[in-house]
Image (cartoon, rainbow, N blue to C red):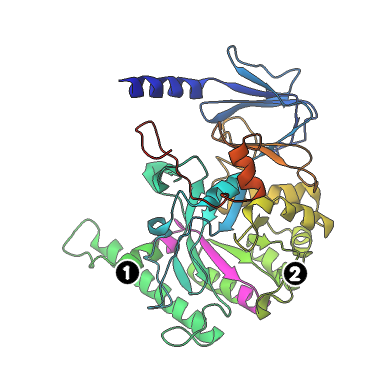
Amino acid sequence: MWTLFFAALAALAQEAPIAFVGARVIPVAGAEIERGAVVVQGGKVVAVGPAATTSIPAGAETRDVAGKVIFPGIVDTHSHIGGGSGADGSVPIQPDVRILDSINARDPGFRRARAGGITTVNVMPGSGHLLSGQTLYLKLREARTIDDLLIRLDGGRIAGGMKMANGTNSQKEPPFPGTRGKSAALMREQLVKAQAYREKLRRAGDDPEKKPDRDLDMEALVEVLDGKRVVHQHTHRHDDILTALRLRDEFGLKMVLHHVSEAWKIAPEIAAAKAPCSVIVIDAPGGKLEARDLSLETGAVLERAGVLVGFHTDDGITDSRLFLRSPALAVRAGMSREKALEAMTIAGAKMLELDSRIGTLEAGKDADLLVLSGDPLSVSTSILETWVEGKKVFDLAKPEDRLVAEGGYGAGVPSMHAGCEGGAP
């Protein structure tokens, strides 16, 4: 009885409006507001504007954030937090594998991501396969199980894409391909099979007797062919990038190019293809030969060419807590401030096809926001608070959250969160 009573009180509290007043607001959707107000209620942004003219609802909890900066929650388009693993060593193409089935929602990586201001993340299987499985788009709410993190689309479908790769990662002993040419041939072969499977389903219509036997590999690839799953393509060398685009065009795929170490060499071709690029920005490149020509100027070169540019951590390549360094390094290398900030927010949201819900501070969008100590591109700025759908999920003022943000003994312990039902603290 008391559990239900307190749960009801909590639900009511969540519906109470909250007004963040006095901060410099960077909505990304428009001009910065020097002394602004952001009002959230029911998990949504209900108003953004100057503090002097924005209506604050009666009964709202007003938070004085003068001297701070309000910024949209960060979108990480490519991460490996959660300890999940995808395809195994049996075959190089495994579209039936779901990273959903192997993510630990209590993994400390999620807490580090919140400390880094990340509110939405695309969690991927690895790149050691031509196709290593289905990715998962997650909201970094407080979670007991993976279901608490899922993003549901219209009809209840779980949001996610498909991870593909080319280059050296997937070149191994048989049954894996040994060359770039064979890699493309194997991928093409499976997509042709998926086209045939889709045609059989179309011809069968509603007649169960005519339908082919259920094939989980083909079902997933049909979703790719139909544009229900965006292909997230790991690729580095300029020739590998062009091969990926060739396959995209041949089969009509939706595709985001990831890493793109040599994209600066073929920026006009990428722009002509209207291919979004999710770039990793690292200040200490190395580790693999095909990424040796990685450049900090890639974001700037692609921006000038008119390419949609986003950033990602590839965590643990870049620690999620340090993600705000990415736009700062990109600006230092020539990218504009405007596009660098978009790359952390709305550009990533577009790549995940979630831009109607996240990526900017606008009325009607999810109340995902950060309270920063200063400008997002300053090396001295700290993330003070992270809010997801109107709920605070990180607070630097709390000792346990500061430990996660700064590191130290116990920072890597998995979450022991338990609800009102009881259990471990």
Look at the image and tell me whether residue 376 can be seen. Answer: yes
- 398 up-or-down from 266: above or below: above
Q: Is residue 369 left or right of residue 170?
A: right
Where residue 193 appears, as percent x and y from the top left, is 36, 74
Where residue 240 appears, as percent x and y from the top left, is 61, 77
Foreground mark, 2 or 1? 2
Which of the two labelled residues, at mark 2 and mark 1, occupies the earlier sequence position?
Answer: 1
Specify the farthest residue to the front.
409
Nearest to the observer: residue 176 or residue 307: 176
**Residue lying at 64% horizontally and 60% vertically, measured from the top left:** 278
Q: Quadrant of residue 235?
A: bottom right
- Are circles 2 and 1 on residues that touch, CB within 8 Å? no
Report the Cα–Cα distance between label 2 and label 1: 38 Å
**Residue lying at 30% horizontally and 62% vertically, measured from the top left:** 202
- 263 up-or-down from 20: above or below: below
Specify the farthest residue to the left.
209
**Residue lying at 48% horizontally and 74% vertically, measured from the top left:** 129
Amino acid type, callout 1: Tyr
Q: Is residue 79 left or right of residue 297?
A: left
Badge number at residue 197: 1
Image quadrant containing the C terminus = top left
Where residue 380 appears, as percent x and y from the top left, is 80, 45
Residue 237 painted magenta: yes
Q: Which residue is mark 2?
A: 264
**Residue lying at 64% horizontally and 41% vertically, measured from the top left:** 402
Amino acid type, callout 2: Trp
